[in-house]
Image (cartoon, rainbow, N blue to C red):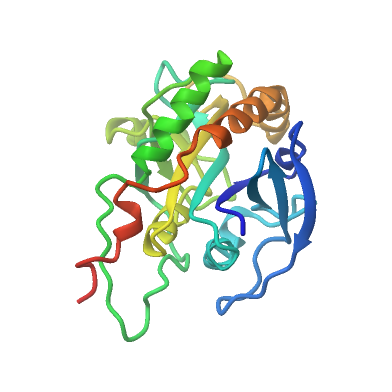
C-alpha cells in the first residue's frame, strides 16, 4: 500500500523515475474524491497522487470535497501527505516563484465540511503546529540536496474563493501575520490531523497578492508561474520521497489521544 500521498495539479505525477501502475477510484462515506488516485512507485516507495481540482482542472476551491479526498488517502494506507498549492505573496520576501514550506495557518474559510466528527463523537485535536515537523525536515533536507532554495517558514491564510481578494483584505491579512494567501489549504490540514496522518504544505508563490503591486491579478499569471516552477517542484518531491523515514516518530500518529470528549 502507498504510504506517501501528494495532492496537487495533474502534472505532478509525471515525475522522472516514477512509474504509475494504476488508477484507483474510491468512494468514501463522504462522497467521491476529486479524481482517481494515481498509484505510482519510485525506488520501491509507493505513492498516491490526487489532483485536487480534478483532471482536467474543473472543481473550484469552495466545491472541493476535502473530506472525501483525505479519507481516500487513508483508505489507501497513506500515512503522510504533501500538499502542493499556488498562493499569492503578501509579505515583502514572498515574491513570485518562491517555494515556501508552510509552518502556520490562519483559517478564514466558511461553509466547508471541515471535520469528520460532526455527529455523536466530539473531538478537539491539538492544532498548535498544523504541519508535521518530521515531514517538514525531510523537505528541507531534499531542498539542500537538490540545491533548491526554500522559505522554511510561512503563515498561510486560507480564504474561500473563488474570487481573488481585495486590497483591504490583503492589508488586513498582513496585519494579523499572514505571509501568503490561498484557497485550498484548509480544511485539508486539519482533516489529515483528525485521521492521524502527517501533513505538510508546500506552496509556490505565483503572484503578488492584491494591492502589493499595481498589476491586475490574472489566472494566466498564476498558471504561467506555476508552469515555470514545475521542474523545481518535481525535483524537490522526488528527493523528498527518498528522505522520508520509514517509521513515524512525530506526534501526528497519536493526534486522537486525549482529544475525544
Residue at 24% in and 73% down? 260
Observer-nearest of 93 and 168: 93
Q: Residue at x 43, y 27 (%)?
A: 90
Q: In the picture shown, does residue 60 fall above or below 148?
A: below
Residue located farthest toward the bottom when viewing the structure as drawn: 120
Q: Position of residue 71 (x, y in %)?
A: 53, 67
Q: Position of residue 238 (x, y in %)?
A: 63, 31
In the rendering, at what x and y percent does residue 120 appear?
32, 86
Decide: is 49 above or below 12: below
Q: On the rendered image, what quadrant is the C terminus found in?
A: bottom left
Up the image or down, 187 lies above or below 247; here it is below
173 or 142, nearer to the observer: 142
Q: Quadrant of residue 234?
A: top right
Side of 225 where 157 appears, left or right: left
Q: Where the N terminus falls, by quadrant?
A: bottom right
Q: Is residue 192 above or below residue 32?
A: above
Q: Nearer the viewer, residue 167 or 79?
A: 79
Amino acid at each position: 500500500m502507498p504510504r506517501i500521498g501528494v495532492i496537487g495539479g495533474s502534472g505532478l505525477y509525471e515525475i522522472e523515475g516514477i512509474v504509475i501502475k494504476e488508477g484507483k477510484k474510491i468512494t468514501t462515506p463522504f462522497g467521491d474524491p476529486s479524481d482517481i488516485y494515481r498509484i505510482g512507485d519510485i525506488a520501491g516507495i509507493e505513492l498516491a497522487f490526487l489532483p485536487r481540482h480534478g483532471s482536467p482542472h474543473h472543481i473550484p476551491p469552495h466545491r472541493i470535497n476535502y473530506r472525501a479526498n483525505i479519507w481516500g488517502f487513508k483508505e489507501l494506507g497513506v500515512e503522510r501527505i504533501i500538499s502542493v498549492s499556488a498562493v499569492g505573496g503578501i509579505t515583502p520576501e514572498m515574491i513570485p516563484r518562491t517555494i515556501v514550506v508552510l509552518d502556520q495557518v490562519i483559517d478564514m474559510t466558511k461553509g466547508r465540511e471541515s471535520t469528520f466528527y460532526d455527529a455523536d463523537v466530539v473531538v478537539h485535536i491539538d492544532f498548535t503546529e498544523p504541519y508535521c515537523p518530521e515531514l517538514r525536515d525531510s523537505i528541507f533536507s531534499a531542498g539542500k540536496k537538490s540545491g533548491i532554495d526554500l522559505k522554511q517558514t510561512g503563515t498561510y491564510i486560507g480564504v474561500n474563493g473563488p474570487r481573488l481578494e481585495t486590497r483591504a483584505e490583503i492589508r488586513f491579512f498582513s496585519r494579523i501575520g499572514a505571509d501568503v494567501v490561498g484557497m485550498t489549504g484548509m480544511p485539508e490540514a486539519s482533516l489529515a490531523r483528525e485521521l492521524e496522518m502527517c501533513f505538510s504544505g508546500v506552496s509556490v508563490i505565483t503572484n503578488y497578492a492584491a494591492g502589493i503591486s499595481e498589476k491586475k491579478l490574472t489566472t494566466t499569471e498564476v498558471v504561467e508561474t506555476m508552469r515555470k516552477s514545475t521542474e523545481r517542484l518535481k525535483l524537490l518531491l522526488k528527493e523528498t520521497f527518498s528522505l522520508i523515514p520509514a517509521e513515524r516518530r512525530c506526534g501526528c500518529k497519536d493526534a486522537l489521544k486525549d482529544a475525544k470528549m
